[in-house]
Amino acid sequence: MERKKIDEFEPGPVPPTRPVDRFGFAKQEPNYSPEGLTKSRLVNEQDKEERRVRKWRKMIGVGGSDWKHYVRRKPHVVKRRIRKGIPDCLRGLVWQLISGSRDLLLMNPGVYEQLVIYETSASELDIIRDISRTFPSHVFFQQRHGPGQRSLYNVLKAYSVYDRDVGYVQGMGFLAGLLLLYMSEEDAFWLLVALLKGAVHAPMEGLYLVGLPLVQQYLFQFEQLVREHLPKLGEHFSQEMINPTMYASQWFITVFSYSFPFHLALRIWDVFLNEGVMIVFQVGLALLQYCQDDLIKLPFEKLIHALRNFPEDAMNPNTLLPMAYSIKVMKILPLIWHRHPPRLQ
């Protein structure tokens, strides 16, 4: 039987219209307003956001022309503003600037088109099979073989050709899908390349290589960090035979984009692209610290459920992220790796 590519499929029916939130995800409760803002407070929030956008536009310049100069002059201001959250209307552009992907795109004209149109991938059927599982409640990806799913297919197929050692692994769809909500296919592809190949920070490709070596390393380090930062909880986990492979793998593989509230995932990604993977460790530890008093009382089955379903109040970025920033892990991680090298399978 001849293998079909996604471009050969007809788009499916357009899903029925449902109320969506400000990010484009279908609302579970149409009448529920998470912010609970009064009209006057909403106006104040809008004014505040407009002032913030003007500051960012001045910092970036037209099309990012002033960005590198500003970062060299005031790196601490840039870091502080990114930690407070990048304005959503500028997020796609800023992500490209801080990740180094804009430079990769400019240095490789025509490469993405070549990979999409003229190359074939051994992963094409796997990609087609998994596409409908990526952000299925978002309007951009809901239509079967529609524009969103086709764009996601193109980016993942192109990467699987570009880096045949990695090819395609399921968790990559959430990275590419998140990026496509803020930029074009070609921009998303080069940002994926920047992340996996390490244009600015340590390369992520080990998260997706055979055997997931980087996932194993990160989970081992995270387990040691839990024991050092939260010794009582770490001891409870040991007694209940809980380890990070049971709850934290997706944190690293998808950088919290798989099952966490989208507004929180975006704030984490702002910092992740600017500062690197340390924020994943910090957010994970902050979540456990925030919920420690409850987690420490739970037996195995309830503990597993709680670690996969954190309460809504724990997911507030304005509470969780400052707590995460206060946790220092940068100097400890390399020491953990050398002190207690794991036995990788």
Image (cartoon, helix red, strand yellow):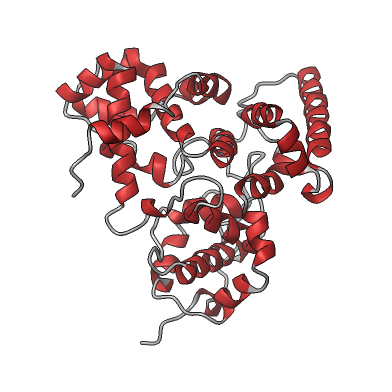
Q: In percent of the image, x 44 and y 46: which residue is there?
A: 254
- Residue in the foreground of this view, choosing between 334 and 242: 334
Image quarter hosting the N terminus: bottom left
Q: Residue at x 61, y 35 (%)?
A: 30
Residue 296, visible in the rendered structure: no
Out of 207 and 233, give the one closest to the viewer. Answer: 207
Taking depth in this image into account, of 260 and 12 the one nearest to the observer is 260
Residue 134 located left or right of residue 35: left
Residue 294 sits in quarter: top left
Relative to residue 211, is residue 194 drawn left or right?
Answer: right
Q: Could you tell me which residue is drawn at 64 percent across and 24 percent down?
A: 35
Q: Residue furthest bottom?
A: 1
Q: Is residue 207 visible?
A: yes
Q: Along the horizontal axis of the image, is 54 left or right of 130?
A: right
Q: Is residue 278 above or below residue 160?
A: above
Residue 65 drawn at (x, y percent): 80, 48
Identify the image quadrant of residue 113: bottom right
Task: Say which residue appears at 21% left-offset and 30% top-offset.
Answer: 242
Q: Position of residue 204 (x, y in %)?
A: 44, 50
In the rendered image, residue 230, in percent from the top left (x then y), is placed at: 32, 17
Q: Is residue 276 above or below residue 192?
A: above
- For residue 44, what is the image quadrant? top right
Q: Determine whether 197 is above or below 237 in the image.
A: below
Nearest the eye: 91 or 313: 91
